């Protein structure tokens, strides 16, 4: 399994607005294309105003195919534009994690 771990740091005071827009418009599109949502979290300690989410894929090729299809979806393009205009996200990091032979995932 390949896990795409993404962390978004929000502009202070914009976390709620981001989550509302994402749940309403972004999540359904991602679920349609990406499929395997492993978890979606907000930070309680440490660096605050962060959203952390993980999506699982069979392989790097599976991830690439799914993300390419999503990036070409007109609904996703419209959502990304609306999200960018809202100015909620300050910074993003992305890690691809490969599971070990003894990992439960």
Image (cartoon, helix red, strand yellow):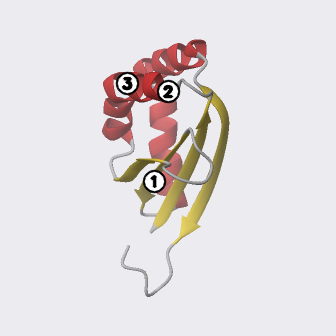
Distance of mark 3 from mark 1, alpha carbons?
A: 18 Å
Categorize mark 1 by other alpha carbons within 10 Å: few (<14), some (14-19), many (20+).
many
Give x and y (percent) for residue 89: 61, 28
Residue 89 lies, with reference to residue 77, above or below; the image says below
Residue 70, placed above or below residue 34: above
Q: Position of residue 69 (x, y in %)?
A: 45, 35
Against 17, residue 94 (above or below) is: below
Secondary structure of the residue carrying tag 3 is: helix
Tell which circle, 2 or 1, labels the residue nearer the N-terminal end: 1
Q: CA distance from mark 2 to mark 1?
A: 21 Å
Q: Position of residue 96 (x, y in %)?
A: 59, 60
Q: Determine whether label 3 and label 1 are within 8 Å by CB.
A: no
Q: Position of residue 59 (x, y in %)?
A: 49, 63
- Which residue is at 47% across, 15% downward? 78
Label 2, residues with CA under 10 Å away: few <14, some 14-19, many ≥20: few
Q: Secondary structure at mark 1?
A: strand
Left or right: 82 in relation to 23: right
Q: Which residue is mark 3?
A: 20
Q: Nearer the viewer, residue 26 or 12?
A: 12
- In front of the other: label 2 or label 1? 1
Instruction: Point out the image quarter for the C terminus.
Output: bottom left
Which residue is tagged 1?
A: 54
What kind of element bears circle 2?
loop
Residue identified by numbered label 2: 72
**Residue farthest to the bottom?**
102
């Amino acid at each position: 399994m390949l896990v795409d771990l993404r962390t978004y740091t929000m502009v202070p005071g914009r976390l709620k607005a981001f989550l509302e827009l994402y749940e309403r418009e972004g999540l359904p599109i991602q679920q349609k294309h990406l499929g395997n949502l492993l978890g979606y979290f907000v930070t309680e300690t440490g660096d605050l105003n962060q959203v952390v989410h993980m999506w699982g894929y069979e392989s790097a090729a599976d991830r690439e195919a799914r993300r390419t299809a999503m990036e070409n979806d007109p609904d996703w393009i419209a959502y990304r534009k609306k999200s960018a205009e809202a100015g909620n996200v300050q910074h993003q990091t992305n890690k691809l994690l490969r599971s070990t032979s003894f990992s439960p995932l």
